[in-house]
Each structure stands twice: as C-alpha cells, then as structure tokens.
Image (cartoon, helix red, strand yellow):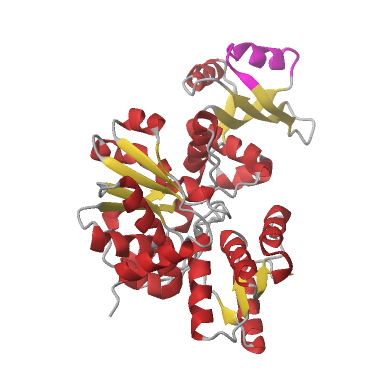
Amino acid sequence: MTSFADAARSTTRALRDLFPRTPLQRNDHLSRRFGADIWLKREDLSPVRSYKLRGAWNAMRKVRAANPAQRHFVCASAGNHAQGVAFACRHFGVQGTIFMPVTTPQQKIDKTRAFGGDAVRIVLTGDYFDQTLAASQSFCAEKGAHFLSPFDDEDVIEGQASVAVELLDQLGRAPDLVILPVGGGGLASGVTAYLRAEAPQTAFRFVEPLGGASLTAALQAAEPVKLKTVNSFVDGAAVARLGDKTFAHLSWIRPEEVLLAPEDRICVTMLDMLNVEGIVLEPAGALSVDVLPELAEEIAGKTVVCITSGGNFDFERLPEVKERAQRYSGVKKYFILRMPQRPGALKEFLAMLGPEDDIARFEYLKKSARNFGSVLIGIETARAENFAALFAQLDAAAFAYRDITRDEILAEFLI
C-alpha cells in the first residue's frame, strides 16, 4: 500500500505539469527582528495567488482518472477555492459550475472568470455562504456532477501536502518549526501528515482568526462543531466548521499549539509586510507571520517556516485595513466629546491637541438646543502615548468624553 508521503511526492511531481514550485524565501527583515532563521513559503505566488489550486487540481485529476466520463465539476466558494477550481477546469478541459454568494465582490468574480474562461459558469445565489453551498449541492445532485470540497476531501488534502514536499526539498533540511494558517484544515492536514512522516523532529504551530476559531472549538469538543458566529474579515480562513476528514488528520494537536490572531492585529501585519517587504498578503495569508511576536522567545535561534497561504487582496479594502491597524496600534481613536455650547469651547479643545495630533473625523451629533452638544471626534497621532496627554488635559478642563474606539456596537453605527 502506498504511504501518504509517497502519494504526496507523486502528486507533487505530477503538479509540475501545471506550475513550478512556489518560492521558499528567507526573510531578512523578520529574521533580524526575531533573531531566528525565518523563511516564507510563498503560496501567494502560485498562478492563482493561493495554495488552493493544488488540492482542487489533484482532486479533479483523481476523479477523472477513476471516471474519465466525468466532465462536470461543481464547487461553492467566494474566493481562492473558486479560482483554483476554475484554473483546473480550464487545464483539464472540463466544465465547471461555480456557485458564489450574491455579495461576492466583483473583483473575485472577475478573477474566477478570467482563470476559467469558457470552461466555467458562475452562478450567484444566496446572501450567505450556507445558502450558496446548499444550492450548489442540490444542483450537483440534479446534474450528476462531481462536487469539489474546498478542504474536506482526502484528494484535496493530498494535493495540499505538496506544499510540504516542496519546502522540505527547497530548505534541504527539516525546519525546527512550521507555522500554518487554519480555516477548514485542508492545508494543515496535508502539510502535517507529510512532515510528521518525513521530518518527525519538526514542531508545528497553528493559527486561526479570533473570529473563526473552528479548530479550537473542535479540539475542545473532541469533534467538529459549528461556530455560532464567524467574523468574515479573514475570508480565506473564516470557516464555521472544521471538516470531518480534516479533524481526523488534526485531532492529535494539543490546544496550546493553536494560536488565535485578532482581526485588527492581522491588519498591522499586512501593512508591515506591504510597506517594509513589498509583499501583498490577504488576511488569511498573513496569519502565520502575525503570530511571530507571540513566539519570539520560543523561536530565537531556530529555523522557522511560515506558510503565506494567499495574496488575493482587493486594494479597495486597503483603507479599511489601515483604519483597523491604526486602531489596534493605538494611534487612532474615536470618542464622543460633550462640548459646552459657549463661545470659545471649540477653540479651547483644539488648543489641547499636540503637534503630532490630527483630526480625522469631526461631526456634531447635537439634536436639540441644549447647553451641551455631543461631537464625534476621530484623532490620529504619531505615537499611542500622545493620547494620555490629551485625555489628561480633557480631564483637567472638565470636558466629558467617552472613548468608543473598541465599542463594537457604537463603532458600527457611528464610525
């Protein structure tokens, strides 16, 4: 019987007909910062800018080998899996029907169509992914097509294992630590299955977005469970339920090996990689780099590989990413100021601002002729500690204010 490692190597060799291996690059900036030997496995540089092509292509290849008459494949995805399936459909010359939520950004729809060309048809249905998934599976059964899961499929897992085959060959030795992003678990399942067999001394850390911790929930319950709510910002890893097959591959993980990355902190990492290194990462693609500060003591002097899993980032989201990064870093705050309705009050407030403070938002919220009016104010500054001086002056002048920067409900309506 062929071992998983042998099958993964065979798949990797066959994959070379599709695209060359993605780079494994030593990152000097991160290596100096953390006193470690840090390498990035650049899955953001695949033909579809994510690793998803590997699993989709391998699953399609296996299905066609077993049943050459199967020429219709279906998937449900709003992102990287859709693009991988589209690319693979065009490669094999088969028909693909790709279901996407109605709310999918036009940029992702256009990219999927570009990769698939005439080989794919895109169906927009459902406001939420669960509705889209149900529609795709119903269509698949009706048409006798083959449904391609984004992660919960053994052939998909085997395809994602090619990432590990490549990185071990490229590095030429076993890394001390591999850091993996986790959504549905397909990438983590494939990479760990291969490296546990071929490089048993290598340790792992797994990273989930704080608002989509499906692996953490599954480990706690000893089985996959559906999260009640999911924050969709890290769209490439915001999965409500880990797969059954992927959990079978990952159930050995200790809870302390899983780290949670706050969505706003991921924005800081994305901007750092863009501004310092010129590397464009989507939120899910930045997960493995984002947790390096938490692991600083552990990784010092060691060889670490971070899987940068994707770079499908719509630059129309850049203002949002910058805003969230500033708020997380403490250099931008929003507050409601209770402004006295008297001559000179506004001038008095403005005089409190320092040379590094800038007003980014100023909006009167006064609704009636009262002695005080509420003002929504957004302040940007160069250093987070500048706010302490501003707030001290406000307190001394008896200006009433409320910091709403991290008040999710008020921020949603006002900011």
Assign the N terminus to one quadrant of the image.
Answer: bottom left
Q: Could you say where residue 228 lies in the image, as x and y percent from the top left?
A: 49, 66
Q: Is residue 306 among the parts visible in the rendering? A: yes
Q: Residue at x 55, y 42 (%)?
A: 407
Quadrant in the picture for residue 258: bottom left
Above or below, comparing residue 137 to residue 280 in the picture:
below
Q: Residue at x 30, y 36 (%)?
A: 37
Above/below status of 34 relative to 136: above
Locate residue 304 relative to residue 267 in the image: left or right: left
- Decide which of 5, 369 is in the foreground and name it: 5
Residue 410 lies, with reference to residue 143, above or below; the image says above
Front residue (pair 69, 400): 69
Q: Nearer the viewer, residue 33 or 202?
A: 202
Asked if residue 121 can be seen in this view, the reply is no
Residue 353 lies in the magenta-colored region: yes
**In the rendered view of the protein, which quadrant contains the C terminus?**
top right
Please give the range of residues in magenta.
Answer: 342-358
Residue 364 x, y percent position in the rendering: 74, 30
- Give me the residue at 64% from left, 75% from top: 94
Query: In the shown orientation, is residue 334 left or right of residue 216?
Result: right
How far across and down, in percent of the image, does residue 276 sit?
Answer: 50, 29
Q: Is residue 340 magenta?
A: no
| Residue situated in front as seen by the camera: 209 or 278 | 278
